[in-house]
Amino acid sequence: MRLISLVLLALLVAVQAELWLGKGSLPRVWALREDLAQAQGRNAEAAERNARLAAEVDDLREGLEIVEEKARYELGMVKPDEIYVHIDPRTDPTAPARP
């Protein structure tokens, strides 16, 4: 009876050692789950950015309005018969006064 108890205790220790120290141990599983959650967060951010870029590409393919808007605001371009006037809000007398 004592021998059986010792054998069972040795098996229990071996199983517990594998559970806590082995290749598929619980701390390793917890670390992998944390890594997975971080990777999924990065993937979600990248998917959102890709969706915005895809929408912008579709807009560029569909019409010239977005191209004109980008040329005006990002490159400062104007049409041949237009005059560009820039009013500085810091010196505009009609702007509401800041408290």
Image: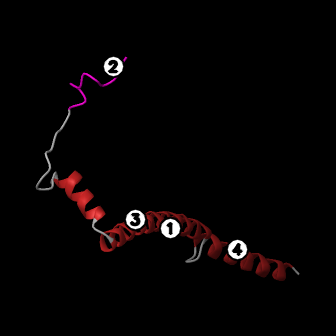
Q: Position of residue 46 (x, y in %)?
A: 41, 66
The residues colored magenta run: 88-99
* Residue type, numbered disc 1: Gln
Q: How far apart are labels 2 and 4 at the CA level? A: 78 Å
Predominant secondary structure in magenta? loop
Q: Nearer the viewer, mark 1 or mark 4?
A: 1
User: Do tag 1 and tag 2 residues touch (Cβ < 8 Å)?
Assistant: no
Q: Nearer the viewer, residue 28 or 34?
A: 34
* Residue type, numbered disc 2: Ala
Quadrant placement of the C terminus: top left
- Earlier residue among tags 1 and 4: 4
At mark 1, the secondary structure is: helix
Q: Would you name the residue on which mark 2 appears?
A: 97
Q: How many marks?
A: 4
Q: Nearer the viewer, mark 3 or mark 4?
A: 3
Q: How far apart are labels 3 and 4 at the CA level? A: 55 Å
User: Do tag 2 and tag 4 residues touch (Cβ < 8 Å)?
Assistant: no
Determine the residue positioned at 48% across, 66% down: 44
Q: Would you name the residue on which mark 3 appears?
A: 52
Q: How far apart are labels 1 and 3 at the CA level? A: 18 Å
Q: Would you name the residue on which mark 1 appears?
A: 40
**Residue 31: assigned label:** none
Q: Position of residue 93 (x, y in %)?
A: 24, 21
- Earlier residue among tags 3 and 4: 4
User: Do tag 1 and tag 3 residues touch (Cβ < 8 Å)?
Assistant: no
